[in-house]
Image: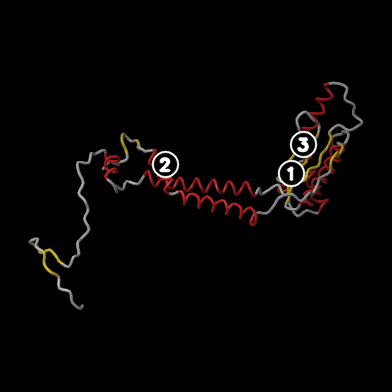
Amino acid sequence: MANPYETDNEIEIDLKDLVFELLSHWKSIVLVTILAGAIGFFVSEFLMTPKYESTSELYVLSKSTSITSLADIQMGTSLTNDYMVVVKGRPVLEQVIANLGLEETYASLYNRVSLNNPTNSRILEITVTDTNPQRAKAIADEIAKVGSAFIAEKMDQDPPTIIQSGYADGLPVSPNVIKNAFLGAVVGAFLVVALILVTYIFNDTITTPEDIERKLGMNILGTLPLEEAEDDGERRTSKGKRKPVKKGKK
């Protein structure tokens, strides 16, 4: 039997009825949205471990290098790209782990270190993420120190100058509690609305004469009123006559 909602393999949807269906469930939508936002806030505030960042900065060209031409500037930019590979390399990071006595592997530290070279500059930013702000600062400073010494020794270059040490201001960079609570509320609202829409679209129950016309495409010629059963102390016999009901003790 064909689906009464489908015509030529397409589902017909009355947008007006769809809007009214959503409005009829507005309390559920608001409740779920608030609940999902509260869950996002609770998880971010009490269950997720805060993470902190600290950044040290290296200046690629030392004061002994004079920039006299465009070629010198381009060479400084190329050196910055080379230093980004060296500073995050295994020899430097493993030396940092040994110097600070860190109980982690090269791979785990590698994933917590990010390098950045601001546009049109010879600045190399070394950012470390950690669950402890003081440890993040110590690692960032040590990477800058060890990296600068490694470049001077292995690459026969003037050591980059450390122009900024790391910081430990105690302000976490993640999780973002407000953002996560908002995202939780949005996801909750989306899910409950999607559930209401899917239920509405695939509901083929006919409850009113209008449903017959709208869903089946059939015209209603007339309706029979539904009367409630009478209970006036009489019953109808098989021939249609009323018969008194004797009331007594059970």
Callout in the foreground (2, 3): 2
Q: Residue at x 18, y 77 (%)?
A: 248
- Residue 159 in the image, given as x and y percentages of width and height: 87, 36
Closer to the N terminus: mark 3 or mark 1? Answer: 3
Residue 222 in the image: state x and y as whole percent: 20, 43
Q: Which residue was labeled with disc 1? A: 113
Q: Residue at x 82, y 42 (%)?
A: 144
* Amino acid type shown at disc 2: Val
Question: Secondary structure under badge 3?
Answer: helix
Q: As rendered, which of 41 and 81 lies closer to the eye?
A: 41
Quarter assignment of residue 2: top left
Q: Which residue is mark 2?
A: 19
Q: Position of residue 27 (x, y in %)?
A: 47, 51
Q: Earlier in the sequence, mark 2 or mark 3?
A: 2
Q: Position of residue 118 (x, y in %)?
A: 76, 33
Q: Residues within 10 Å of mark 1 (few under 14, many from 20)?
A: many
Q: Which residue is mark 3?
A: 84
Q: Image check: 7 left or right of 107?
A: left
Give SS at disc 1.
Answer: strand
Dot 2, how many residues are within 10 Å of its Cα: few (below 14), some (14-19), or many (20+)? few
Spatial CA distance of label 2 from label 1 is: 50 Å
**Amino acid type shown at disc 1:** Val
